[in-house]
Image (cartoon, rainbow, N blue to C red):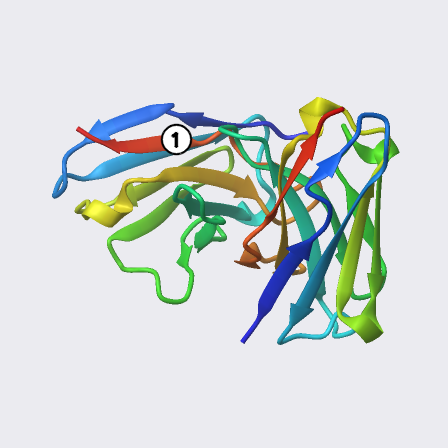
């Protein structure tokens, strides 16, 4: 059974760096075709895909946020970490991580972690 | 970058009726790698359909997907009370994995 769980700070100040962690079980991120992605959702708004990392360390980013995002993996810890630099109140959102195979959709999601950007 | 436009923004229907939700892409979606998700308040999205028409595990057969190229449709044949939610389409075959803006299906 695949599970994912997001963790991170609930409150971040503007201009700081946000770091959220996805801890997963039930699959290996060293197995061929496996990926983990990050998606966020501001309150009352639509889903926005942010980044994705594959088993072979191939990394993909949202073009609009690419300069501020970094995604990394720690296969031994079964974790994927997303950092977002220079945050602004518009970055306030629920941040989700999700499992994906190369051409498949995001089939299993975590429950999300709520992050507020405010001074 | 492909833009996905969903219509209508809100759909008001009664249980037992059928629902048709649309997702239009600004350019052709490669290999029809188009997914549909359902999201209820306070919950993460749930995958319903991938590759335009393949139901995910455990999804009832009243949910069906169709379409190709730039025009895709999610059809719910007989609405159950638990089907009232927000639905999103997403391009999943290649980066960027864009989402549509969502269609809210509400009880009339």
Seen in the image, is B105 located left or right of residue A10? left
Task: Return the residue nearer the eye: A49 or A97.
Answer: A97
User: Is residue A71 in view from this perspective?
Assistant: yes
Answer above or below: position of B92 versus A107: above
**Residue B95, horizontal then vertical, whole percent:** 71, 43
Which chain does tag 1 point to?
Answer: B
Q: Pointer 1: residues within 10 angstroms few (<14), some, or many (20+)? A: many
Seen in the image, is B92 located left or right of residue A18? left
Residue extending farthest front: A119
**Residue A29, horizontal then vertical, whole percent:** 75, 69
For image coordinates 62% across by 63% down, the residue present is A4
**Residue B13, horizontal then vertical, whole percent:** 19, 31
For image coordinates 19% across by 48% down, the residue present is B80
For image coordinates 57% across by 49% down, the residue present is B31
Seen in the image, is A119 located left or right of residue B67? right
Residue extending farthest left: B16
**Residue that badge 1 annotates:** B103
**Residue A9, horizontal then vertical, whole percent:** 73, 45
Seen in the image, is A78 located left or right of residue A70? left
Location of the C terminus of chain B by quadrant is top left
Task: Return the residue nearer the eye: A95 or B32.
Answer: A95
Answer above or below: position of A94 versus A73: above
Location of the N terminus of chain B by quadrant is top right
For image coordinates 28% across by 40% down, the residue present is B84
Answer above or below: position of A37 versus B87: below
User: Is residue B8 in view from this perspective?
Assistant: no
């Amino acid at each position: 059974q695949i599970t994912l769980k997001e963790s991170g700070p609930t409150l971040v100040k503007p201009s700081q760096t946000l770091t959220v962690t996805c801890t997963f079980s039930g699959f290996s991120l060293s197995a061929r075709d496996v990926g983990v992605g990050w998606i966020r959702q501001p309150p009352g708004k639509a889903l926005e895909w942010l980044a994705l990392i594959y088993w072979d360390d191939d990394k993909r980013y949202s073009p609009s946020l690419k300069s501020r995002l970094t995604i990394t993996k720690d296969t031994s810890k079964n974790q994927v970490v997303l950092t977002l630099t220079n945050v602004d109140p518009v970055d306030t959102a629920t941040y989700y991580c999700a499992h994906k195979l190369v051409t498949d959709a995001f089939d299993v999601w975590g429950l999300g972690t709520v992050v507020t950007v405010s001074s | 970058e492909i833009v996905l436009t969903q219509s209508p923004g809100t759909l008001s229907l009664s249980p037992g009726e059928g629902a048709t939700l649309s997702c239009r892409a600004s350019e052709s979606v490669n290999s029809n790698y188009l997914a549909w998700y359902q999201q209820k308040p306070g919950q993460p999205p749930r995958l319903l359909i991938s590759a335009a028409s393949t139901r995910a595990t455990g999804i009832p057969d009243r949910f069906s997907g169709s379409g190709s190229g730039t025009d895709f449709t999610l059809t719910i044949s007989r609405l159950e009370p638990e089907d009232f939610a927000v639905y999103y389409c997403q391009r999943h075959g290649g980066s960027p994995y864009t989402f549509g803006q969502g269609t809210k299906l509400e009880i009339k």
